[in-house]
Amino acid sequence: MKKIMFVLAVVLGLSATKADAQYVRRRPTFSVGIHIGAPGPAPYTDGVWIGPEWTWRGGQYVEVPGHWEHRRHGRAWVPGHWRHTRRGDIWVRGHWR
């Protein structure tokens, strides 16, 4: 029983550490070659520019370049943004609303 409790405590401790890993004190910046705004006209009539985003990979935020997507009927794209918390800043991914 003690062994099970110990393993459970270790697993919970590691999962809490993993959850905290996405908070940063200094927000990263996009590389010079990354297009923040649309790089030109849409390639199709219902094109929506999805700007660059950040994703958590390998213990750090990694930039994901922007791309074009077809507009989703009745929905609007909400761009990703940084949210400040007491623990640090965290990236909130863009999504369709």
Image (tube, grey):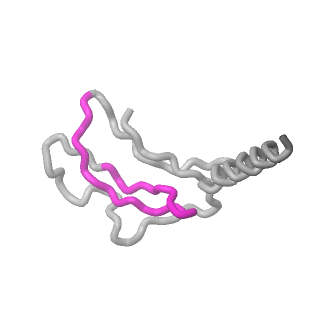
Residue 38 relative to residue 55: left or right: left
**Numbered disc total:** 0
Report the residue at 24% width, 38% height from top.
71
In the image, the segment drawn in magenta is: 50-73
- Quadrant in the picture for the C terminus: top left
Query: Where 72 falls versus 21 (above or below)?
Result: above
Q: Residue furthest right?
A: 2
The residue drawn where x is 66% and y is 47% is 85
Pick whichever, 7 or 81, lies toward us: 7
- Left or right position of 35 against 84: left
Of the 4 image quadrants, the one containing the N terminus is top right
Residue at the spot x=60%, y=63% of the render? Answer: 26
Quadrant in which residue 77 is drawn: top left
Position of 54 relative to 74 (above/below)? below
Q: Is residue 71 left or right of residue 94?
A: left
Quadrant of the rendered image containing residue 59: bottom right
Viewer-proximal residue among 55 and 96: 55
Which residue is most to the bottom?
Answer: 32
Q: Depth check: give the residue in front, 87 or 60.
A: 60
Q: How far from the left and from the top, in percent, is residue 21? A: 63, 56
Residue at 50% x, 60% y is: 57
Is 69 in the magenta? Answer: yes
Q: Position of residue 50 (x, y in %)?
A: 32, 49
Magenta highlight: main SS? strand
**Residue 67 falls within the magenta-colored stretch:** yes
The residue sitting at the top extreme is 74
